[in-house]
Image: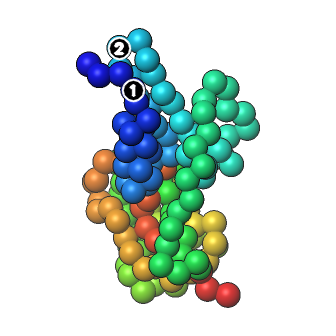
Amino acid sequence: MASLDVDTIRHALATAQSHGYSFVRIKSGEESFRAVLKDAVSEMHEVPSLAVAEISESHPASSDIDVKAPCVGYFQEASSPVSVGLKLEPGSVLGVINALGIKNDVTTKKGGEVLEILVKSNDPVEFGQVIARLKVTA
């Protein structure tokens, strides 16, 4: 297997960012690379032995925010399904992620209008994967 070079690491980071992942881990033989992307760092108290990658999100409008999965599991719609165009209050539940039989709410930190829903019911999701995009309303 080839060694880890800068181009491979850059490609992995770009791919992780474009798919909404918060962690990157690459291993080739004895070499390994791990990174926590910028948004995940704020959710952690300390990051032992992990490199922090400075990757900024680019959105068409600066008032758009991503709602990300809080854990790995299977996404299920909320009891009141959320649809594009719906206006949500801060703390609204977008859905639930079932992880080993434990239901974890996916909530919004800010209120806004739903622009896009990126997963369907029963889709598997990764930690940090973007579930939906909102346009923040004042």
User: What residue is shown at x 35% (from left), y 14% (from top)?
Assistant: 29
Q: Amino acid at mark 1?
A: Leu
Report x, y in % for residue 133: 46, 71
Q: Nearer the viewer, residue 48 or 2?
A: 2
- Of the numbered discs in the image, which one, if any, rests on residue 51? none
User: What residue is shown at x 32% (from left), y 62% (from top)?
Assistant: 119
For the question of whether residue 79 can be seen, the reply is no
User: What residue is shown at x 65% (from left), y 44% (from top)?
Assistant: 41
Report x, y in % for residue 4: 39, 26
**CB-based contact (under 8 Å), mark 2 and mark 1:** no
Q: Nearer the viewer, mark 2 or mark 1?
A: 1
For the residues labelled 2 and 1, the Cα–Cα distance comes to 9 Å
Please give left or right for residue 45 compared with residue 68 in the image: right
Q: Amino acid at mark 2?
A: Gly
Please tell me whether residue 66 is drawn above or below residue 75 in the rendered image: below
- Of the numbered discs in the image, which one, if any, rests on residue 29? 2
For the question of whether residue 29 can be seen, the reply is yes
Q: Specify which label sits upstream in the sequence, 2 or 1.
A: 1
Please tell me whether residue 96 is drawn above or below residue 62 in the rendered image: above
Report x, y in % for residue 85: 42, 86
Report x, y in % for residue 83: 38, 79
Please tell me whether residue 24 is drawn above or below residue 68 in the rendered image: above
What residue occupies the far top of the structure in this picture?
Answer: 30
The quadrant in which the N terminus is found is top left
The quadrant in which the C terminus is found is bottom right
Secondary structure at numbered mark 1? loop
Q: Nearer the viewer, residue 66 or 26?
A: 26
Disc 1 crowd rating (10 Å Cα; few below 14, some 14-19, many 20+) is: some
Secondary structure at numbered mark 2? loop
Residue linked to disc 1 = 4
Q: How many numbered markers are drawn?
A: 2
Residue 136 figure quarter: bottom right
